[in-house]
Image (cartoon, helix red, strand yellow):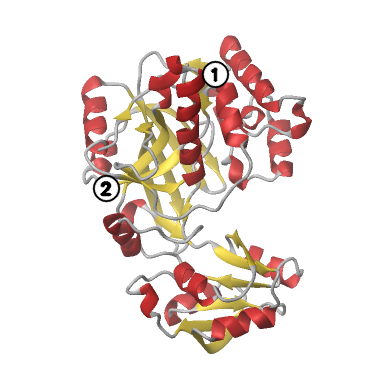
Amino acid sequence: MPVFEPFIGLRFEQSRFAESVAPPYDVLSENDVRKLRDSSPSNVTWIDVPLLDDGDDPYAIAATKMNEWIASGVLIPDDTPSFTIYRMTFTDESGVSRTIDGVIGALEVVPEGGSGVLPHERTTPKASTDRLDLTISTEANLSPIWGLSRATGLSALLAELGEHFDTVEIDGVLHTLERVSDPDRVAAIRECVSSSDVLIADGHHRYGVARQYRQHVATHHPELATAASTTMVFVNEMSPEQLAIAAIHRLYTDVTSDELRAALEASYDHIGSVPADDQCLQAMADASAVGFVTSDATVELYVPQGSAELGDRNLDGARLEHALSGISHTVTYQHGVRNVVDAVTSQAASAGILIRPVPFDEIVRTAERGDLMPPKSTFFTPKLLTGTVIRPMR
């Protein structure tokens, strides 16, 4: 079972908190980063998202700035090791007000194929060493990975309020942070999370970087081996009430729209068309269909004919991967219907295919069987902010 420990965190001085946090690096464009930096000299993007024009060694510059913030009191270390309860309150796509409650701590870094911490989908290759270089320079975890605990009772343990740290509302989501340093409560949370597997929900690449960092430390900085044996993870209970799952849609290039449609129709039946508006996802859900987006902003609905190769797996992403495996194409991933439609109508993509969110039961089945979903199968919302707490490793 995985180790899950409290740590002495670095936190932005409270009067700066709202202006210092930011969305995760992988959803920010360079323009987004510049706007956030312009909004505050203490915004976390100054250290979490190095830019090429920051200087000759942007990672060393990020580390220097972080150390300057610590020295000047912009970042303040906790007095004792603690967990951070992180609550996100929001209105979901069906109009229901919800709160997701999780806890940030240091989760064990296990070898690939090891037990205790499990992937739930295959990852796409990334050539960039950006996150590893940044971790080596700063010797810190700057943003949390998202993990799902199979231990029952975690939500109940987090229901009691901790020491309130701060609250900020961004894009309609209320983010609330509370510290837990009471020894008895720390022990209860540690034992609960450590009692069962944790499934990586969001941040597979960052968890892979944590493995690389652990290997780097073993060779170059053995004195950091203990700290590098864990990485910062937000963990919440794997239950329907504690998850909001959206789809990540597909964009296709290096193939014509007609070629793609022909390949699709070998495994799917066309049942009709709807406009590419906010209602198309409901039409897809009602018909158990995927949506083929055309250049005139129409969504053609297709239902699968069935595939013995896929057995009982209810995954649009897996069915599409199988259906299109016989033609050459390039696929990228995009969330939001409007983003997909814009890419197709502007001819940035030959075609787009909208898929349905992965059902909760399929996520449970993946964990139980040790299966892997195709890359970018799930989009967990809301996104965790960066800067809520930083975990130094020296």
| Camera-nearest label, 1 or 2 | 2
Q: Could you say where residue 342 lies in the image, as x and y percent from the top left?
A: 70, 67
Above or below, 3 relative to 240: above
Secondary structure beneath label 2: loop
Q: Residue furthest top?
A: 71
Where is mark 2, residue-wise? 150
Out of 315 and 274, give the one closest to the viewer. Answer: 315
Which residue is drawn at the image coordinates 48% and 40% (left, top)?
208
| Mark 1 neighbour class, 10 Å CA radius: few under 14, some 14 to 19, many 20 or more | many
Secondary structure beneath label 1: strand
Above or below, 109 relative to 306: above
Where is mark 1, residue-wise? 75
Quadrant of the rendered structure where residue 151 is? Answer: top left
Above or below, 214 relative to 351: above
Which residue is drawn at the image coordinates 21% and 23% (left, top)?
184
The quadrant of the image that shows the N terminus is top left
Above or below, 303 relative to 22: below
Out of 235 and 94, give the one closest to the viewer. Answer: 235
CA distance separating discs 1 and 2: 33 Å
Name which residue type carries label 1.
Leu
Sequence-wise first label, 1 or 2: 1
- Residue 174 placement, left or right of 132: left
Quadrant of the rendered structure where residue 147 is? Answer: top left
Q: How many marks?
A: 2
Residue 189 visible here: yes
Q: Could you say where residue 101 lies in the image, as x and y percent from the top left?
A: 35, 42
